[in-house]
Image (spheres, rainbow, N blue to C red):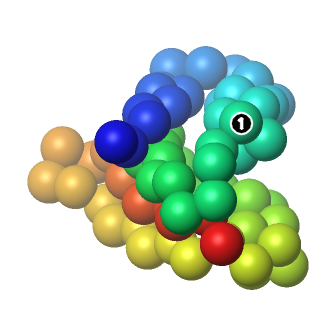
Amino acid sequence: MTQIVDGRGLEPPQPFELVMEALADLPAGGNLTVLLDRMPYPLFRILDRDGYRHNSRIRDDGVVEIEIAAP
């Protein structure tokens, strides 16, 4: 089951905080989908550092969608 965090329309640092809370509760092998208004480059550095696999894309509607898999 994939958990979804929708951070669209929120002011920083709220989206980052929501994602970090969701990651803290994500079980090993779990998946998280994040929806944002912009690319979260600081988040990518943390994901890389902590061993999460992630892919991002900009959808046709302009939403940044990030798929994150727990190590």
| 46 to 38, vertically: above or below | below
Task: Pick the residue in front: 11 or 21.
Answer: 21
Task: Name the residue rendered at 42%, 60% in the picture.
Answer: 67
Where is residue 1? Give x, y as percent: 34, 42
Determine the secondary structure under disc 1: helix
Where is residue 42? Give x, y as percent: 79, 62
Where is residue 55? Give x, y as percent: 43, 73
Where is residue 23? Give x, y as percent: 70, 45
Within 10 Å of the Cα at label 1, are there few (<14), some (14-19), or many (20+) other Cα atoms?
few
Q: Is residue 56 left or right of residue 48?
A: left
Query: Label 1 sits on what residue type?
Result: Asp
Numbered label tally: 1
Q: Is residue 53 left or right of residue 44?
A: left
Task: Pick the residue in front: 33 or 71.
Answer: 71
Task: Name the residue rendered at 51%, 54% in the picture.
Answer: 30
Task: Name the residue rendered at 22%, 55% in the picture.
Answer: 59
| 57 to 2, vertically: above or below | below
Q: Which residue is mark 1?
A: 25
